Image (tube, rainbow, N blue to C red):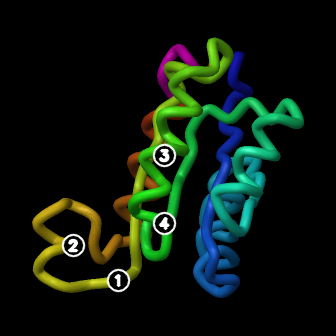
Amino acid sequence: MPERRRVLLIEHDADVRASVVQALAGRGADVVVASDLTDGLARLGDGVAPAVVIVDLRRASGAARGFVSAVRADPRLGDVPVITMTAEGGARARERGEAPFDLEDVLGIVLSLCEHERCA
């Protein structure tokens, strides 16, 4: 069962990662970080049970689908919400609902998800 307010953040950019971690931790979240999808899967394999997963799509959009499929296939994690985001702009990214992310929007979504029954 996911732990309350534990968030797995998969973000390759150290500066973005630090900003998101600081913002989430400041609002009571326990943030586990991974620098890429492989590292994220390893963290999940090590028993990390997040309430929410945040995945950076900037360099991993195709691989992110495989990551989400792997999470969905795990009975322990199948209903854990996965939020995708990117700091990269552009019309195509905006059309896909990916870019650019607003930190306050992400925080609001994550904290809202952490308040649902699955996180209690």
Mark pair 1, 3: CA separation: 20 Å
Are there few (<14), some (14-19), or many (20+) residues within 10 Å of tag 3? many
The label nearer to you, 2 versus 4, is 4
Among the two numbered marks 2 and 4 on one chain, the one whose residue lies closer to the N terminus:
4
Q: Alpha-carbon distance for marks 2 and 4?
A: 13 Å
- In the picture of the structure, the residue carrying the numbered disc 4 is 60
Q: Secondary structure at mark 3?
A: helix
Q: Which mark is residue 93?
A: 2
Badge nearest the viewer, 1 or 3? 1
- Tell me if residue 37 comes above or below residue 57 in the rendering: above
Question: First in sequence: mark 3 or mark 2?
Answer: 2
User: Which element type, helix, strand or loop, lies under badge 1?
Assistant: loop
The kind of residue on which mark 4 rests is Ala
Residue 1, how many percent across, how many down?
71, 15
Q: Quadrant of the C terminus?
A: top right
Whole-Å distance between the Cαs marked 4 and 3? 21 Å
Report the magenta residues as a range. Answer: 115-119
Q: Quadrant of residue 43?
A: top right
Q: Please provide percent x and percent y for residue 118.
A: 55, 17
